[in-house]
Image (tube, coloured by chain):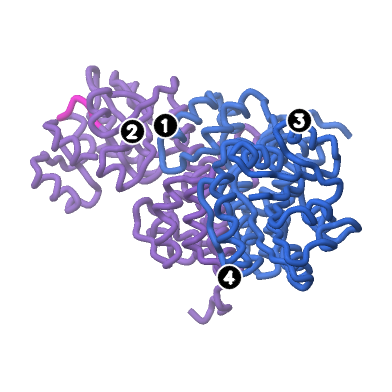
Chain colours: A purple, B blue
Amino acid sequence: MAQNLIKSGCDVTVWNRTKSKCDPLINLGANYQSSPKEVAANCDVTFAMVADPESAIDVACGKNGVASGMGPGKGYVDISTVDGATSKLINEHIKATGALFLEAPVSGSKKPAEDAQLIFLKAVAPLLDIMGKSRFYFGEVGNGAAMKLLVNMIRGSMMASFSEGILLSKKVGLDPNGLIEVLSQSAISAPMYSHKGPLMVKSLYPTEAPLKHQQKDIRLALALAESVSQSTPVAAAANELFKVAKSYGLGDADSSAVIEALKAKSFSRLDSA
Amino acid sequence: MEIGFLGLGIMGKAMSVNLLKNGFKVTVWNRTLSKCNELVALGASVGETPAEVVKKCKINIAMLSDPAAALSVVFDKDGVLEQICGKCYIDMSTVDPDTSCKISEAITSKGGHFLEAPVSGSKQPAETGQLVILAAGEKALYEEAIPAFNVLGKKSFFLGQVGNGAKMKLVVNVIMGSMMNAFSEGLVLADRSGLNPHDLLDVLDLGAIANPMFRGKGPAMLQDNYSPAFPLKHQQKDMRLALALGDENAVSMPVAAAANEAFKKARSMGLEDLDFSAVFETMKILKHKS
């Protein structure tokens, strides 16, 4: 996303917790500041794309966080996927400085990010239009976060049920690649199936969106469901599979690695590790 | 080519109309004979029993609602078996692999030829000839059926031995049932969280999980419109059969199991003849009655 902004001629200043990750961007012409506070202080609009609610709060409201460098005339756009409560908390801290806040979680992962095809949920218009193919405005803070969580909740359930289908087809003597082909002709043909399916059949999970983040999103969606007393048994069942996959050490693999959670594993006691 | 067609439900009616409109001679049968009248008006002949149809036609297609109906049409008095010697039987119903194998054995041991060919696609693809046909069994019969398959569907697959078509159909439909539940959970949660569910439809349609089912059924679901393209009772039957397959083969399927529970709940609420998307109703706030 930062690359896209630089390539389209924006004046970009970057920060990352691990500084070395900034080097490729600096080579493309980005400036560097040593803290979120310094970035905010030196820029008109600051975007944040971090992994989870804890990081989002830390970057925005922590020591040397964005809020310390904000003020009237500036804006903060948090593109991270977090829960509504986190988003509202950050909103309060930022608005207290006189600056403007926008939550703008995105739908799409690494490849769409490279292809500038992320879907955005509100416009800091020209900048968002550089990074995304489509944007929606959903009203008050919290709504963008919620919408993102729902999409990813459905996505996680679909990935889990697709995994069940692939394994069932294999076990009953069908060619799973044949299943993928049939699906692509059917009413439930989704790009995700034809894109990820062939790799899953070969037990390959190159990371486009980490499994641990997909699980985080389902977890947050389930919490949202709980907060309004809505039963979501299918998402809950899918969540258990993602938890199992995480316990196998697959958190950094692609979210499609959830299929491993369904596979028969040989029994071995924990204490023999 | 003259074709016998057994079963004029939602699918069978549309499919036989399609064959007639594309120049095939068709002889039809239905358990409730009056359902044949519409087809007769379009030029079909009628057989009073399955045996009568098979006696008349070399190639016969069946499109029945479930394993019980599929078996009954073959094995009962005046059933297909009585006249099957030298004839061909293509069962396009969705049944479990064991039922399909049982029918296949009976047909072939009486000198008939058998192909299972369940389809993916419901009412509208049946009407427009856009079904996906999942055939397995006698390859020679598959080749002979291709002109009819080309009218009925947009793509046909030959999947090998009898049972493979049934299995493929069940795997596809178990994923579909789970997806419909996931979709419904998302829509109802959108509404309960103060979002506009139509916005969720728009966002879904732009990303990696966009698919014709969400696009086609979402708006109708949000208007409480469950006019049946694929009755919920049949979808739940397919979930049950797929879970049984998983059970026989020790395949873990927790998401499908959870989805099946929702379909069962829908049946208990009297929604079984509505479209399977009516599972959405089970997730809305219900008045508790003791």
Location of residue A97 (image quadrant): top left
Pinpoint residue B151: horizontal percent, then vertical percent.
Answer: 56, 44
Q: Answer with mark 1 or mark 4, whichever residue precedes in sequence.
A: 1
Residue designated by label 2: A78
For label 1, the crowd category at 10 Å Cα-Cα, with few meaning under 14, some 14 to 19 and many 20 or more, is many
Q: Is residue A178 left or right of residue A40?
A: right
Q: Nearer the viewer, residue A127 or A71?
A: A127
Pinpoint residue B37: horizontal percent, then vertical percent.
Answer: 79, 33
Residue designated by label 1: A87
The amino acid sitting under disc 4 is Gly
Q: What's drawn in magenta, residue-wise?
A: A42-46
| Cα distance between the residues tagged 4 and 3 | 42 Å
Q: Answer with mark 2 or mark 4, whichever residue precedes in sequence.
A: 2
Is residue A162 positioned above or below A124 on the image? below
For label 2, the crowd category at 10 Å Cα-Cα, with few meaning under 14, some 14 to 19 and many 20 or more, is many
Pinpoint residue A162: horizontal percent, then vertical percent.
Answer: 53, 54
Pinpoint residue A209: horizontal percent, then vertical percent.
Answer: 37, 51
| Cα distance between the residues tagged 2 and 4 | 48 Å
Viewer-nearest of discs 1 and 3? 3
| Cα distance between the residues tagged 1 and 2 | 8 Å
- Which quadrant does the N terminus of chain A fall into? top left
Location of residue B26 (image quadrant): top right
The amino acid sitting under disc 1 is Ser
Residue designated by label 3: B286
Q: Is residue A85 visible?
A: no
The amino acid sitting under disc 2 is Asp
Residue A45 belongs to magenta span: yes
Q: Chain of mark 2?
A: A
Q: Is residue B117 left or right of residue A89?
A: right
- Which disc, if any, is residue A173? 4
